[in-house]
Image (cartoon, coloured by chain):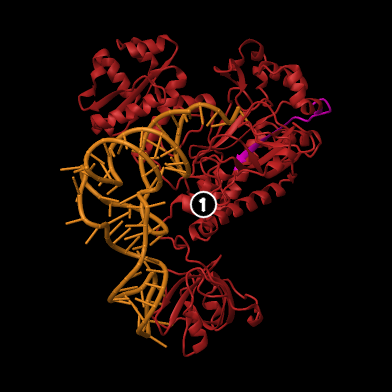
Chain colours: A red, B orange
Amino acid sequence: MLICTPTPNSRRKRMKRTDYCGALTAAQNEKEVTLAGWVHRRRDHGGLIFIDLRDREGLVQVVFNPQLSEAIHQRAHQLRSEFVIQVNGKVMRRPAGTENKDLPTGEVEVHASDLEILNPSLTPPFSIEEEKEPSETLRLQYRYLDLRRRSVQTNFILRHNLSKAIRRFLDQHQFLEIETPFLTKSTPEGARDFLVPSRMNAGQFYALPQSPQLFKQILMVSGFDRYYQIVRCFRDEDLRADRQPEFTQIDIEMSFIEREDILSLMEEMVRTVLKEVRGIHLESPFPRMTYQEAMSRFGVDKPDLRFGLELKDLSDIAARSEFKVFRDAVEKKGLVKGINAKGLATLSRKELEELTQEATGRGAKGLAWMKATPEGLEAPIAKFFKPEMLQEIAQRLEAAPGDLLLFVADREKVVYEVLGHLRLVIGRRLNLIDPKALKLLWVTDFPLLEYDDAEKRYVAMHHPFTSPMDEDIPLLATDPLRARAKAYDIVLNGTEIGGGSIRIHQNEVQSKMFELLGITKEEAEAKFGFLLQALQYGAPPHGGIAFGFDRLTAILAGVDSIRDVIAFPKTQKGICLMTNAPSEVDPRQLKELHIKPTE
RNA sequence: GGGGCCGUAGUUCAGCUGGUUAGAACGCCGGCCUGUCACGCCGGAAGUCGCGAGUUCGAUCCUCGUCGGCCCCGCCA
């Protein structure tokens, strides 16, 4: 129950706020100010009462002194955490020796001459102060209180500053911000669509966009030349720390350009924005790596370059060894690769077992290991290798006494998956990752297609509108899986923060692509007819990129989940704990929408 | 669909091998306090141990189920 009622409106003097609490310094000494904000903390001495008053910009100490006004002091006794108040008073330097160096406003305080309680507050379910982090469940349930916390607010201020800087950069480079529909057409391929029933068209549905991909290409056909949008996208897939059903992309498209133009301009954008928002100077140019190289050296297409521990190929040695597991792998056109876990020869049997489980959990049949000692490599499997082979292995992995060498022999895909993962696990375990480092790179030359074992057909690795490399176009007819795409990703600290491609702008190539993907002419016509048609009316060569704005912000904010940079995110089950969405609806609504529940 | 971790005062947590009345800190309520700033001192209230079954003389603790949160695999062109 509220124990105190607000000051009646009729009694309010309606003085306007003059300053932010957090902005007061000795420069405002002796100024009469009106402040408004939340009671952050009170220190009631019976006589003097100190209040830390908080607003968006920070805290300032307000002093209520009975000698200044007995009535106001009495009223201040009622104050509790999170009451909303307005205070009139005079900014004063604090008495010598009572300054608070930990507070930006700590040189001054406000001597209150008037106090209005604009609104009392229930005792909040958790403290707005920072000492202890409430559980995420509680934070999301009371998100409006969570968003009052300083550490949370700074994430959103950062987000704002990033989008502001990005808009400014793109504006300066002649990009036009153009909005595209949220109620649009469901398309095959890609993620599951969120559907919106059409009341006026029984049995028909809009889909929320997975991205404005097709529209931005159409805008290029329209001649807008340079487009961008910071825009919400929707994908009905399972959630992760870095995946929400609705998320924000910085969506960009340009005409009359080649890959190089996009990479260099986007690189400039990232550098400019980080400089502006974070004062960070990034070395230029960013490293570049083909997909092939990234996979072979790091096992993933989004390598974390903050540490080494690269994968080394040992297939040639493995083929000559007596170790059946290794030889079989190579003979079956697989691979044997290893990494050097520096200094981990001391791992116990149990810890090795845990690493093995990490490996088998990702599809490996086992995890082979050797320990480097001053006498050479030692392991149960060492007996299958001639001494000079062991030496060769040690050399290739730059083994020093005390190191642990880990090997995986399998199909290429498994070897990369497992060692790529182990590399991250070990990098973390060995504390090789500098949390402050920002390591960016471009990964280029992605394969155009992948083979989907379940569906028994090719699927586009990026999307069906991605142009193949010119020199690989003949491969589409002979060996499609070897064809490379004009596609690129930008990677920051092991996270893909953006990706794009040069698009197909010729109808024939686009039709050929659909054919490869097993999309019939009729399907293509029904699903993408508008694009195919547009491509026949003078489509300029074009290409673009989309950044995951939430992921980028999260990394720069130093948080592990994009939930921390989204004001009202959803839980892993896609539920908003604050509003309790999704929820059931009135049967009449369903009827209007021509929808009948199946259960 | 699958694997893992978690759920105990308002909050963050502790709670031994299953055994007295389930604790601490912060917060909250009351009292005292004129230089505090994580104010201090005195006192007080506060628990469906997520929920439901089972095992047991006895369950916060063990088992099964279920609900919720988190991490991951699958999925995410």
Residue A466: x, y in percent?
67, 26
Residue A99: x, y in percent?
42, 77
Q: Amino acid at mark 1?
A: Leu
Q: Nearer the viewer, residue A171 or A22?
A: A22
The residue that appears at 48% across and 84% down in the rendered structure is: A74
The residue that appears at 61% across and 54% down in the rendered structure is: A160
The part of the image, by quadrant, that contains residue A521 is top right
On screen, residue A237 versus residue B27, left or right, reads right
User: Was residue A380 drawn as part of the magenta stretch in this picture?
Assistant: no
Q: Is residue A439 visible?
A: yes
Query: Start and end of the magenta stretch?
Result: A534-548
Residue A458: x, y in percent?
61, 18
On screen, residue A324 versus residue A99, left or right, reads left
Q: Which residue is mark 1?
A: A140
The vertical placement of A523 against B11, above or below, is above
On screen, residue A490 versus residue A205, left or right, reads left
Please state the chain letter of the residue tagged with numbered disc 1 in the rendered image.
A
Residue A355: x, y in percent?
33, 29
On screen, residue A338 versus residue A120, left or right, reads left
Figure quadrant of the C terminus of chain A: top right
For label 1, the crowd category at 10 Å Cα-Cα, with few meaning under 14, some 14 to 19 and many 20 or more, is many
Furthest residue in direction right, as rendered: A537
Callout 1: SS: helix
The vertical placement of A55 against B70, above or below, is below
The part of the image, by quadrant, that contains residue B18 is top left
Q: Is residue A69 visible?
A: no
The residue that appears at 59% across and 78% down in the rendered structure is: A7
